[in-house]
Image (tube, helix red, strand yellow):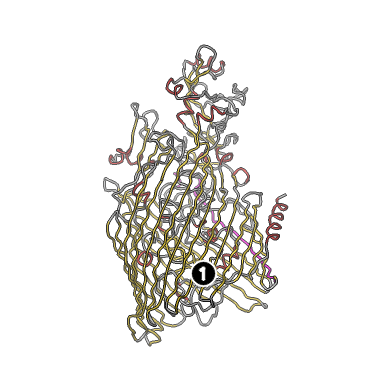
Amino acid sequence: MRGLRFLLCATTAMGFATTGHAQTATATQPGAPATSTPAPATEQPVSIADIVVTGSRIVRDGYDAPTPVSVITEQEIRRGAPVTVADYVNQLPALQASNSPRTALATTGGGLGGANLMNLRNLGFARTLVLLNGRRVTPSTVTNAVDVNTLPQGLVSRVDVVTGGASAAWGSDAVSGVVNFILDTKFKGLKGGIQGGISEVGDAESISGDLSWGTGFNDDRGHVVLSFNGAYQGDAWLRDHDWYKGYKILTPNPAGSPTRLVLPNATANLTGTGLIISGPLRGTLFDESGGVASTAFPFGPVEIGLLQAGGTQNADLSLNNLQIAAPLKNLSLYGRVSYDFTDDLSGFVEASYGYSHSTNYSGTFWRVDSEPISINNAYLPSSVRDRMVAAGITSFNLSHMNQDIGIPQADNTRRLGRVLVGFSGSLGDNWKWDVSAQYGESRIRNAVNNNIIPSRVLAAINAIDDGAGNIICADPAARAAGCVPYNPFGSRELTAAQRNWMTFRSLAHVRMRQFVAGVNIQGDLFDLPAGAVTLAAGAEFRRDSGGVIDSDPIASQPAPIAYVSNLRPYRGTINVKEGYAELAVPVLKDSALGKSLDLNGAVRYTDYSTSGGVTTWKIGGSYSPIDDIEFRVTRSRDIRAPNISDLFLAGTSLVQFVTDPSDPIQAGRTVTVLQTTRGNTALDPEKALSLTAGVVLRPSFLPGFSASIDYYDVKISDAISVTSSQQIINFCAAGLTTFCSALTRNASGVLTDVSVQPFNARTEQARGVDIEVGYRIPDLGGGSLDLRALANYVDKLEIVSVNPNGTTSIITRAGEAGNNLGSFQGSPHWRGLMTATYAKEPWTVQLKGRFIGAAKMETDFGPNDINRNHVPSVFYLDAFASWDMKVGSGKGQFFVAVDNVLDKAPPVVASQDPLNNQGAGTNLVIYDAIGRSYRAGFRFQF
């Protein structure tokens, strides 16, 4: 059946189109390969005038900018056969913990579910600047992140990934680097393709297609290009994948050491029909009809806190409810018209539209030993009431999945519209200029279906007999509001009245608008013996505005109303004025002291309406003592300004489970609190000092070989961060009274509310090494062999916080694979991406390896802290094959691709999240949870 479904999918793709090699553009211009790390051997150099590789604003033949850039060509992307371009780019070792339809699966608020957000160096989406043809893209979120799914993809000729600070050249948010999607705006002809795919177990289905057309007019003085692409990716659920073994962290270990136990077959002490786990009625299990089961609940042999291990898996929240891939639909439309009015004056108009829609689920409204049941409850079986009287108790707490109510489902729709107008020209032989104005608007519709109102659920459960044989809600205020009783014992379909009382459909609209106008000029100032001194300079005005334009009246109330997605309306505007200058100075060329020495420097002054002025800069150089070797180094000061969410968030509330060391009932008890996150208009921009230093090798004795190794060190001061609710609680319990003001307790001292907001409160550091190697053998058995390898070693990834008492707290993420709360995820030390491609007409075959090194769940854990801390290394093998053919006057290509050929299961990584009773037992951000999957399709070009 699985093979048949794949065959049908592939046959469908074959029936739609025939395809050919896509037109490709090289990463660099001739004589300038050092602008990037080694150009992929799969590409032959093509002379392209005035191509800007994103490491610099300087455009000049033979100029090697010192900032490292990894370049992904169109041909490389097509040989990966991804459903979207982001799926391939996210495999680069330098990109870690990016948001995708397979990561932020439980996110329901803000419209982030299903979005593809780039994350360089694992330092966060907000510190990675995404460009389209070297220009900013209107943010898709209030945190300034861009959903790459909404960008035009059918014309992508290459992707430049700047793996160093680039704020002086490109502006704010480029702290960890830049991802620049370059489109082929001069394409001529017609090309397109379609492909389909499916996983080994029959889920995660996909189909995607694109069509692009371009032509010149008026003797090629004008040019028009149009492009369309669309894609669908299906969902996947944990229950359909047999690698899941229910591993979770149980703590504290009653034996004392180790403190934490990572055990399989672990689940929460609850059922879908109701269970009593404490007090004299412990073990009482209710059956489907709501009566008492004939046998007591079989608790597992290991029971710690809210979890048990080795018992029944029937009520496993993860197994029954966890999505490991969210369904996604996206499409984009792109059009561009350009015209050369004279030899020295050109203009263009560009417009694009992007659409993305996804649905993803939160968790059920589960309650472990916390759903209060009175002896007067009208639904309580009489036998249980009699036992309560005999035991001398008047109430107990029920453990209950509330599965009949269902799971809240986020329904996110994102739309991006963008219009760009520009002119460019030349002044004499050496000076060029351009001006442009761009307006874009992102609209996000964030609906949550079946959003639960916890207070109403508890009111409906608290039901009594009115003395006349009618069951009513016990609370008079709830009755007056229309409360409809609900039987928590057993399992039955809710009536429409019950569902209308306990759930609702929350709806919020998020809108982001961006206007950008800029002018740039470049030319040679004067000549030195080694060449011309070149200046690039410009100015830009930008206005970002938006926020949560409106939200549901129920969810936006300040009280804890909805289970998820309590968004409140807010708006904000940030005006930015900036100017920059970059200088390239050739010092040596073909001299006795070396083959070449180039210096590069840039400075940018930026004035923010919210926080004032700030200066960024970079200085660097590249030196080649001989043709075979080049050394490069760059030092820069970069910034990230607070975004609209950081500054103006009105208060987003959600229900959170935390551990309270100061709980008056039981120290360390897990309690439910309302967490409200707010903005802070007093924030300043983050400042980062970045250093990159490396060497590029192109040995003349080994033609076709090139390699680079670069060291990087990024230190961010005044980092904008939000301390988690759990950290605030822990700091207060430790005597740091500053944090206690964020906590609210009721008259009994039980924690009820936690308030969090961002501060410029800590420093963060990322340090490591990037390695890239390429080797091309142009004639091997009548074909060519291309080898390319990229690797990243993370030496340090730290959050450093200075506590109010002067002590320092350091959180280390390097060498970890745990599901961590807070600023960024854990990162194994080593990641690698390797390809071997053999092409002999008409066939091309490629093997690709993805390597993730060994790690620990938590580097701070010792042998007395946890019984299982090692996470083994993982190697995924992918395969690709294509066959070229003649299609009329054009070219066609049939291709097949298999990801995770060996069907490698993800390693065990138990979550450290207090909610780990609904965890995948691995890290979905790092590892492949889908398993072996297949894709096939056709491409064509005329």
In this picture, which residue range is highlighted in magenta? 861-886
Q: At which x and y percent is residue 876?
A: 59, 58
Is 901 left, or right, of 534 in this rendering?
right
Residue 124 makes an appearance in the image: no
Which residue is rendered at x = 59% and y = 45% of the image?
Answer: 237
**Label 1 is placed on what type of residue?**
Thr
Position of residue 884 relative to residue 757, above or below, is below
Left or right side of 721 for 23: right
**Place of residue 558 in the rendered image (x, y in percent of width and height, measured from the top left):** 37, 35
Pick whichever, 117 or 865, lies toward us. Answer: 117
Q: Is residue 938 in the magenta section? A: no
- Residue under numbered circle 1: 185
**SS under mark 1:** loop
Nearer to me, 620 or 502: 502
Magenta-span inclusion, residue 871? yes
Q: Is residue 745 above or below residue 480?
A: below
- As drawn, the residue found furthest toward the top would be 468
User: Which residue, as the protein is rendered here, is positioned at the far front?
Assistant: 218
Write the residue at 55% across / 71% down: 187
Q: Position of residue 532 (x, y in %)?
A: 36, 82
Name the spot of residue 132 as percent of width and height, x first: 46, 63
> Can residue 121 be seen at all in this image of the molecule?
yes
Task: Work out whether 404 lies above or below 234.
Answer: above
